[in-house]
Amino acid sequence: DTGVSQNPRHKITKRGQNVTFRCDPISEHNRLYWYRQTLGQGPEFLTYFQNEAQLEKSRLLSDRFSAERPKGSFSTLEIQRTEQGDSAMYLCASSLVGESSYNEQFFGPGTRLTVL
Amino acid sequence: AQKITQTQPGMFVQEKEAVTLDCTYDTSDPSYGLFWYKQPSSGEMIFLIYQGSYDQQNATEGRYSLNFQKARKSANLVISASQLGDSAMYFCAMRGESTGRRALTFGSGTRLQVQP
């Protein structure tokens, strides 16, 4: 399978705990994006990387959230001191500059976070 | 700022018939791209079709076509010959091209149910 993969697929945690999610993009894709999707809504942009550089962050990305892409390949999204409002599906996507004229983003299956 | 509006929370269509899913948008960016994604119950977002704001012709991709009316700021998705496997959430999204931002802005989605 050469698509975007995300681990874990499901995470249940207690309020106040830290959680970390991993995303492996499509091989050679140089852009990687994180989105959050709550029930009944469309995805909301969180942040994006080009190679290892984090180029854009949404206001949704509070100081409890941190994302890294240390070697320009996989990425991690960490949420510290989780709150019940963090419960959502966290989606990762990747794209390759120049692959097509519109650089569509390819999405992974998501990590569903439940904060009790 | 960018905004996508999908006014149909749910739609029903009979198998083999055509269906139109509505999408209107608002942006101050003179150059932008419009996307449609399908999200089955498995959760993964699947790219369907793209329309650039300067494209003269409506985009088509197999059974999918995009009815782009720039003056009305609408980008409706038409699915011809519906199949049972088309049952899913459908999201309209846009990306401004002039500012260099890569984030997609999504609408709230339309749930399509194809009936046999």
Image (cartoon, coloured by chain):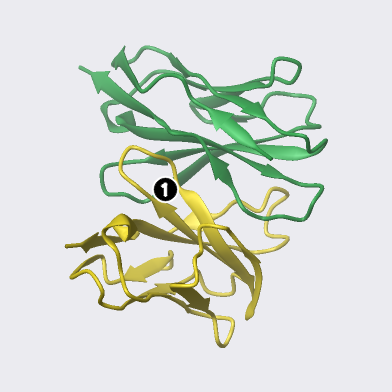
Q: Residues within 10 Å of mark 1 (few under 14, many from 20)?
A: many
Q: Residue at position x 69%, y 53% from top?
A: A100
Q: Amino acid at mark 1?
A: Met
Q: Mark 1 — residue? A: B45
Chain letter, colour yellow in render: A
Point out residue A34 in the picture as x, y percentages from the top left corner: 49, 62
Observer able to see residue A1: no
Q: Is residue B59 above or below residue B15?
A: below
| Front position in the image: A96 or B94 | B94
**Image quarter in which the C terminus of chain A is found:** bottom left
Quadrant of res B16? top left
Residue B3 lies left or right of residue B14; in this view the side is right
Point out residue B105 in the picture as x, y percentages from the top left corner: 57, 43
- Rendering colour (chain B): green
Observer able to see residue A42: yes
* Total labels drawn: 1
Q: Secondary structure at mark 1?
A: loop
Chain that bears disc 1: B
Residue A85 lies left or right of residue B7; in this view the side is left
Quadrant of res B109? top left
Q: Is residue A30 above or below residue A104?
A: below
Q: Residue at position x 46%, y 35% from top?
A: B91
Residue lying farthest bottom? A71
Q: Residue at position x 64%, y 64% from top?
A: A96
Q: Is residue A39 above or below residue A96?
A: above
**Image quarter in which the N terminus of chain A is found:** bottom left
Q: Residue at position x 38%, y 68% from top?
A: A5
Point out residue A32 in the picture as x, y percentages from the top left corner: 56, 67
| Front position in the image: B24 or A86 | A86
Point out residue B55 in the picture as x, y percentages from the top left corner: 78, 31
